[in-house]
Image (tube, rainbow, N blue to C red):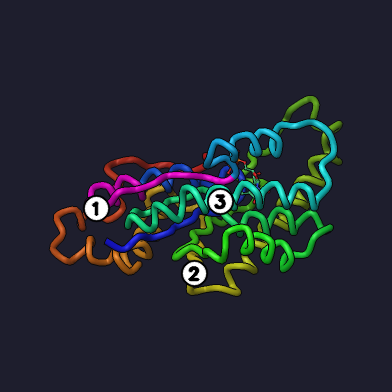
Amino acid sequence: MTGAFVTLEGGDGSGKTTQADRLERWLREHGRTVVRTREPGGTDLGLELRQMLLHRRGHVDPRAEALLYAADRAQHVATVVRPALERGDVVLQDRYLDSSVAYQGAGRVLGGDEVRELSLWAADGLLPDLTVLLDLDPTVGRGRREGDGTRAAWDRLEAEADEFHGRVRRAYLELADAEPERFLVVDASLGVDEVAERVLARVRQLPGIADAAAPGDPTSTDPAGTGTGTGTGTEG
Ligand code: TYD
């Protein structure tokens, strides 16, 4: 079996977890061993770094932040992702280097290219076979608080946050444009089942996975392995 490396990218609330669950189920039903993982925090060291990155109080310099994400990535790729790919497993990963380019680059202190170079160095050059970008208007994804009495006091901060997340979204779309063969961009405002079908249609074409999804496959009438669920896919 050939391993495959699939990453999911997108803003908060774009539905990455739901889509990864669907895809994992389909892959397992087709006999694949799936490693579900994420960054930051896919290793023991990474969990400590994640704690620092997401929960530590106080200012962190943008270069220090970029290096912490890169350190998490280096450990994760070397000890989890590459060994899994070498075993022939499918690695299904929530966020990877495109997150660094989009988020650290959107802070406007660091350039996207230098962040990408740093990430590629950390990962010793490993790029995904497929990156699914779940594209969503960030104000939808983050679920704006309407009619909340504290709203006025938060307007300036929220506007800044909206602007930042707007830059993240644009950066992601530029990355996808630059590497159309690696990226699949899906409109995440579509229903969960529709998104799942589009993702699966592309995953089935990956070398190694194509064999598992041969015509006449008994599950091919339910290509997304969706059962009956419907929804709008707002969870992260
Ligand atoms: P997480 O709780 O995993 O959020 P989500 O459910 O949206 O994936 O938090 C990960 C956060 O870390 C998210 O806000 C994006 C950010 N991040 C970066 O800024 N750079 C990176 O390289 C990675 C991997 C994540």
Residue 212 lies, in percent from the top left, at 22, 61
Amino acid type at circle 1 is Asp
Distance between the alpha carbons at the discs numbered 3 and 2: 14 Å
| Element type at mark 1 | loop
Residue 108 lies, in percent from the top left, at 82, 58
Q: Residue at x 47, y 43 (%)?
A: 17
Q: Which residue is mark 3?
A: 95
Q: Which residue is mark 1?
A: 222
Specify whether residue 28 is painted magenta: yes
Disc number lying in front (1 or 2): 2
Above/below status of 64 relative to 132: above
Asked whether, in this view, residue 85 is left or right of residue 54, the answer is left
Ligand 1 is within 8 Å of the C-beta of the residue at disc 3: yes
Distance between the alpha carbons at the discs numbered 1 and 2: 25 Å
Quadrant containing the N terminus in the rendered view: bottom left
Residue 209 lies, in percent from the top left, at 29, 62
| Element type at mark 2 | loop
Q: Based on the displayed image, in which of its 4 quarters is residue 194 positioned?
A: bottom left
N-terminal label among 3 and 2: 3
Toward the viewer: 56 or 176? 56
Q: Based on the displayed image, in which of its 4 quarters is residue 99 positioned?
A: bottom right
Above/below status of 117 relative to 8: below
Quadrant containing the C terminus in the rendered view: top right
Q: Which residue is mark 2?
A: 182
Q: Based on the displayed image, in which of its 4 quarters is residue 41 positioned?
A: top right
Asked whether, in this view, residue 124 is left or right of residue 149, the answer is left
Q: Residue at x 71, y 35 (%)?
A: 52
Distance between the alpha carbons at the discs numbered 1 and 3: 27 Å
Above/below status of 191 relative to 125: above
N-terminal label among 1 and 2: 2
Amino acid type at circle 2 is Arg
* Start-end of magenta stretch: 23-39
